[in-house]
Amino acid sequence: MTLPELGAKKPSRCPVCGRAEVEPRTRTERFTYEDGPRVVEVVAENVPVEVCPACGETYSGPAAWSIRDEAICRALGLLTPSQLRELRTGLRLSLAELAGLVGLEERTLAEWESGRAIPNRTADRLLRLLAAQPETIRFLSGLPAPPLLPAG
């Protein structure tokens, strides 16, 4: 008898039909995303899902949504959540420090980095400028604290 892998989930029955165990799969998803008046085509590769072989119902969790969020940002031409984290850590700034420099709430920046929200184009360009011209940080640090901007 072998022990199950640490952290491995037990197979689960389909909650819709109850007739079969769901099976893990990865797939490519194509969908549209509305960005104000424009609609963009999004392609998300290697999305982990579970599929019921009996009824065809598909389930996905946080890992799948993370991949979809990254794909949406790429389709919009915006920094992805992982690129935002890399940018901030590359500048050696905490969430609070970067948020304070650009006048955002720390929670807003955390939501962008986690993929729970998508930054607007203005914020995306400002963050790209900071990464390309890190000396701008010294300039921003010398300015009075800006008022906080709402998310979005």
Image (tube, rainbow, N blue to C red):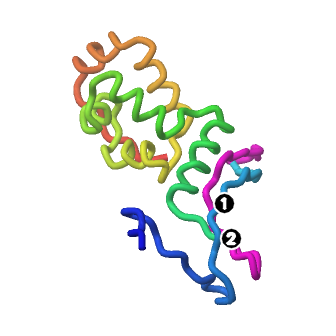
Amino acid type of the residue tagged 1 in the rendering = Arg
Q: Dot 2 lies on which element?
A: strand
Q: Secondary structure at mark 1?
A: strand
| As drawn, 145 above or below 120 | above
Q: Nearer the viewer, residue 11 or 109?
A: 11
Cα gap from disc 2 to disc 1, whole angstroms:
7 Å
Which sits earlier in the primary sequence, circle 2 or circle 1? Answer: 1
- Residue 114: x and y, percent? 43, 48
**Residue 93 colored magenta?**
no
Q: Quadrant of the N terminus?
A: bottom left
The residue to which callout 2 is attached is: 51
Q: Is residue 68 left or right of residue 98?
A: right
Write the residue at 49% across / 48% down.
115
Residue occupying image coordinates x 22% and y 17% = 142
State the image coordinates of residue 4 (x, y, percent, origin top left).
42, 68
**What's the amino acid at mark 2?**
Val
Asked if 25 appears above or below 19 in the picture, the reply is above
Region in magenta: 35-57
The answer to whether marks 2 and 1 mark residues whose Cβ atoms lie closer than 8 Å is yes
Q: Is residue 36 left or right of residue 5?
A: right
Q: Quadrant of residue 93?
A: top left
Specify the quadrant of the image occupied by residue 103. Answer: top left
Camera-nearest residue between 130 and 5: 5
| Tag 1 residue | 25
**Observer able to see residue 101:** yes
Q: Is residue 54 magenta?
A: yes
Query: Magenta: predominant secondary structure element?
Result: strand
Nearest the eye: 36 or 92: 92
